Image (spheres, rainbow, N blue to C red):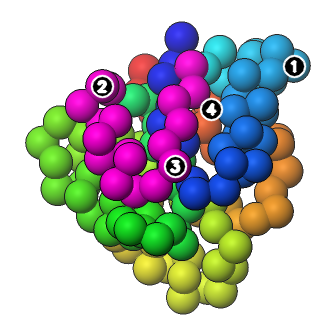
Amino acid sequence: MRKVLVVDDSASTRALVRAILEDASFADKVGGCEVVEATSGFDAMRLLPRGPYDVIITDINMADINGLELIKFVRGSEHHKKTPLVIISTLAAQKDVERGLALGADAYLTKPFKPEELCDTCAKLFDGQD
């Protein structure tokens, strides 16, 4: 079973991502996931030692430690630097996407996104680990 850390200050977004990744109809794509939720970048940093995680999914706009700062921290960490990162954000401008990918995100999805997009993205990242 894959372990995914979802970092977003929106409870509804965390619940949506959890529902998609734990949905049996997508199990053939993602192979079953255990989802761990973090309510902020700070909360994610507290949960990282409880990994390893197969994928980290993060929002950008969060109050204490934003998603870009979290990505920078993860990429600089000896234990987590190779963990695939996905940004899910309302920021849809090309410059935002380029900035997120340049900092080390492996994929960038804009809200609203389709469940299939998230599953396909995670499946590709999981396949890259096997």
Q: Which mark is residue 39?
A: 3
Give the SS element for disc 1: helix
Marked residue nearer the N-terminal end (3 or 2): 3
Give the image quarter of residue 90: bottom right
Mark 2 — residue?
Answer: 50
Marked residue nearer the N-terminal end (2 or 4): 2
> In this view of the protein, can residue 26 be seen by the observer?
yes
Where residue 87 sits: x, y (%)? 55, 59
Mark 1 — residue?
Answer: 25
Marked residue nearer the N-terminal end (3 or 1): 1
Give the SS element for disc 3: loop
Give the SS element for disc 4: helix
Residue depth check, mark 3 versus mark 2: number of the one nearer the observer:
3
Marked residue nearer the N-terminal end (3 or 4): 3
Above or below, comparing residue 33 to residue 119 in the picture: above
Mark 4 — residue?
Answer: 123
Q: Is mark 4 in CB contact (under 8 Å) with mark 1?
A: no
Above or below, comparing residue 66 to residue 29 in the picture: below
Left or right for 112, reference 31: right
User: Looking at numbered disc 2 in the image, what kind of residue is underneath it?
Assistant: Arg
Residue 41 colored in magenta in the image: yes
User: Looking at numbered disc 4 in the image, what kind of residue is underneath it?
Assistant: Ala
Residue depth check, mark 4 versus mark 1: number of the one nearer the observer:
1
Where residue 16 sits: x, y (%)? 77, 42
Spatial CA span between label 3 and label 4:
24 Å
Spatial CA span between label 3 and label 1:
26 Å
Q: Is mark 2 in CB contact (under 8 Å) with mark 4?
A: no
Spatial CA span between label 1 and label 2:
28 Å
Which range is magenta?
34-52
